[in-house]
Amino acid sequence: METTAKTKSQTFINSDQLLDHWQGHRRLTRKVIEAFPEDKLFTFSVGGMRPFGELAMEMITMAAPGVEGVVTRKWMSWTEMEASFPKPKTKADLLKLWDAATDRMNELWPGMPAGRFNEMEKFFGQWEGPVYWSILYSIDNEIHHRAQGYVYLRALGIEPPKFWER
């Protein structure tokens, strides 16, 4: 019985480790963006899915603004959030937005109040749940859309980056 109590109280991963894990995914997704031919990034689609440039913009829209909402407890609606970002027209523009979001996440993260992960929050004014859920959802969403990017790259005859090289 004592072992069970200890196991439940131990922390699996700390805040800095979680950010590092997320940023590892972001480094890999950045490599996927880089692998796309310029003329296919915003146009190529398979099976009616959105082009990868649009999927990457969704990830950008969730990343730093999500961390900002968690840290400040102030959230814009999803519609307001999407409207607040410029629509990139080139791979360079998209990578610039990607890097700015990454830098902003790193800047904001240390301001996260202790114990915040288990507090309830309405993520982008839409989805209510514990803060840890919203962060994990953002990571899962990125993995999901990056996998679509892998399918696109393979359909274009391009070998995608190794998924373990984060």
Image (tube, rainbow, N blue to C red):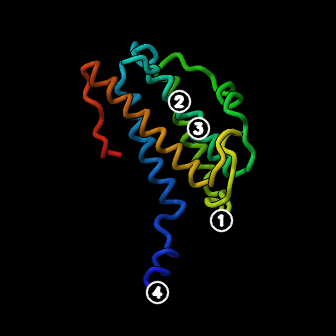
Asked if 76 appears above or below 105 in the picture, the reply is above
Image check: 109 left or right of 47?
Answer: right
Image check: 31 left or right of 16?
Answer: left
Residue type, mark 4 in image: Glu
Crowd rating for badge 1 (residues with CA inside 10 Å; few <14, some 14–19, many 20+) = few
Q: Position of residue 43 (x, y in %)?
A: 44, 13
Q: Do the residues bearing badges 1 and 3 touch, measured as CB atoms within 8 Å?
A: no
Q: Residue at x 65, y 65 (%)?
A: 114
In the picture, the disc for residue 62 is: 3
What SS does tag 4 mark? Answer: helix
Asked if 120 appears above or below 65 in the picture, the reply is below
> Given this view, does label 3 or label 4 mark the residue nearer the observer?
4
Q: Earlier in the sequence, mark 2 or mark 3?
A: 3
Crowd rating for badge 2 (residues with CA inside 10 Å; few <14, some 14–19, many 20+) = few
Q: Do the residues bearing badges 2 and 3 touch, measured as CB atoms within 8 Å?
A: no
Q: Residue at x 49, y 18 (%)?
A: 90
Image check: 137 left or right of 47?
Answer: right
User: Furthest-right residue in view?
Assistant: 74
Which residue bears the numbered disc 4?
2
Which residue bears the numbered disc 1?
114
> Given this view, does label 2 or label 3 mark the residue nearer the observer?
3
Q: Earlier in the sequence, mark 2 or mark 1?
A: 2
Quadrant assignment, res 76: top right
Which residue bears the numbered disc 2?
96
What SS does tag 3 mark? Answer: helix
Residue type, mark 3 in image: Met
Q: CA distance from mark 4 to mark 1?
A: 26 Å
